[in-house]
Image (cartoon, rainbow, N blue to C red):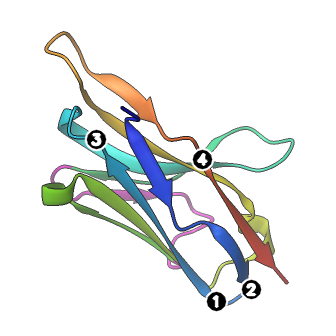
Amino acid sequence: QVPLVESGGGLVQAGGSLRLSCVASESIYSIVTMGWYRQAPGKQRELVATITSGDTTNYADAVKGRFTISRDNAKNTVYLQMNSPKPEDTAVYYCNVLGKDSPASFKNFWGQGTQVTVSS
């Protein structure tokens, strides 16, 4: 069973909007944080935004005021609403979840990545 399934990526014009979704499988429980990271060509993977089980959010300075992260605990789903994207937001976006799939310990789970391309 794929632990995380992302959707919503694609091509968007600068100034438009796009929403990414990530569903965590039912095998993942005790989720602490959910978040989004991104990796542009030739660059390291970087944090975009995270949200805790208590709905505390954290954003990279580059996306503050433009992107909004939210989660639906009942659906084990995290969203990233991207408003007014810029060409420099072009990257592969990865979903990340800190939780458990066994009683042993917490683990970081990663999605397969979804491409977001912002045209100028």
- Look at 21% across and 39% down and name the residue there: 31
Real-space Cα separation, disc 4 to disc 3, in angstroms: 16 Å
- Look at 70% across and 80% down and name the residue there: 12
Instruction: Give the overall secondary structure of the magenta segment.
Output: loop
- Residue 83 shows up from this direction: no
Q: Are marks 4 and 2 in contact (CB under 8 Å)?
A: no
Q: Three-letter amino acid code at disc 1?
A: Gly
On whether residue 19 falls in the magenta region, the answer is: no
Q: Which residue is mark 3?
A: 25
Query: 22 and 56: which one is in front?
Result: 22
Real-space Cα separation, disc 3 to disc 1, in angstroms: 30 Å
Q: Three-letter amino acid code at disc 4?
A: Gly
Real-space Cα separation, disc 4 to disc 2, in angstroms: 20 Å
* Residue found farthest to the front: 1
Given this view, does label 4 or label 2 mark the residue nearer the observer? 4
| Residue 13 numbered mark, or none | 2
Instruction: Tell me the magenta residue range.
Output: 53-66
Circle 2 — which element?
strand
- Look at 40% across and 42% down and name the residue there: 4
Q: Are marks 3 and 1 in contact (CB under 8 Å)?
A: no
N-terminal of the two: label 4 or label 3?
3
User: Residue 97: image x %, image y %?
Assistant: 36, 39
* Residue found farthest to the top: 104
Given this view, does label 4 or label 3 mark the residue nearer the observer? 3
Q: Neighbour class for label 4 at 10 Å: few (<14), some, many (≥20)? A: many
Real-space Cα separation, disc 1 to disc 4, in angstroms: 21 Å
Q: Neighbour class for label 2 at 10 Å: few (<14), some, many (≥20)? A: some
| Residue 113 numbered mark, or none | 4
N-terminal of the two: label 4 or label 2?
2
